[in-house]
Image (cartoon, helix red, strand yellow):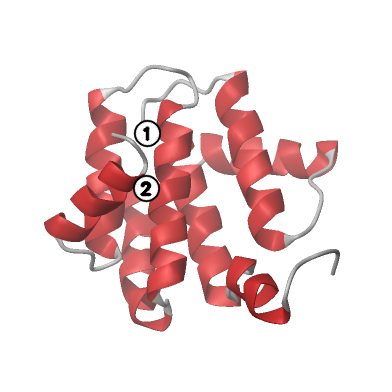
């Protein structure tokens, strides 16, 4: 594990439920402003690869693109609400931070993206104070 302790390696891993929720949120955020940019696709791909520990190939990028295009945000957020209790704080923080990264990937923050980030935090049962603290730690 090249320089990583077992504890830090475990800390960098996303739980299975967390990975599913993260994927759902990345798709929801990328489609929030109804405009999909190359930088958003690249950001989603990179974040997924980091969280899953698996490289993202062209076929997977195509699949992600289709998911974003066909995303039903309301259904995805409802599903997120159902599994929020299965996620630990680290997963929730990773999801919010990743969602924020997608939001700023195109260097423009659309009102709908900001609203969607708040909806994700709400679905994850994060209080306003927790979301604000995460945004401050991200330099916002």
Q: Are marks 1 and 2 in contact (CB under 8 Å)?
A: yes
**For mark 2, what is the residue?**
73
Is 18 above or below relative to 37? below
Mark yes or no: residue 14 visible.
no
Pointer 2: residues within 10 angstroms few (<14), some, or many (20+)? Answer: some
Disc 2 element: helix
Residue at 35 percent across and 74 percent down: it is 84
Q: Position of residue 88 (x, y in %)?
A: 41, 77
Residue depicted at x 55% and y 65%: 20
Indicate whether 59 appears above or below 95: above
Q: Residue at x 26, y 43 (%)?
A: 136
Query: Which element type, helix, strand or loop, lies under badge 1?
Result: loop
Decide: is 35 above or below 18: above
Relative to 30, 116 lies left or right: left
Q: 83 and 109: which one is in front? A: 109
Q: Residues within 10 Å of mark 1 (few under 14, many from 20)?
A: many
Residue in the foreground of this view, choosing between 35 and 96: 96
Task: Specify the farthest residue to the left.
Answer: 128
In the picture, the quarter occupied by the N terminus is bottom right
In the rendered image, residue 38, in percent from the top left (x then y), is placed at 62, 20
> How much space separates mark 1 and mark 2, taking CA atoms?
8 Å
Q: Quadrant of the C terminus?
A: top left
Q: Residue furthest front?
A: 3
Observer-nearest of 74 and 90: 90
Instruction: Choose mark 1 or mark 2, whichever is in front.
Output: 1
Q: Position of residue 93 (x, y in %)?
A: 39, 60
Q: Which residue is mark 1?
A: 32
């Amino acid at each position: 594990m090249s320089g990583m302790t077992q504890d830090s390696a475990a800390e960098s891993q996303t739980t299975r439920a967390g990975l599913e929720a993260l994927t759902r949120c990345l798709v929801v955020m990328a489609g929030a402003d109804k405009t999909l940019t190359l930088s958003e696709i690249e950001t989603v791909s990179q974040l997924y690869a980091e969280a899953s520990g698996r490289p993202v190939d062209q076929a997977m990028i195509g699949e992600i693109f289709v998911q974003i295009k066909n995303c039903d945000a309301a259904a995805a957020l409802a599903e997120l609400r159902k599994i929020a209790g299965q996620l630990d704080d680290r997963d929730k923080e990773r999801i919010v931070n990743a969602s924020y990264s997608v939001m700023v990937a195109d260097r423009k923050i659309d009102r709908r993206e900001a609203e969607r980030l708040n909806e994700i935090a709400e679905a994850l049962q994060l209080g306003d104070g927790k979301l604000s603290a995460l945004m401050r730690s991200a330099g916002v």
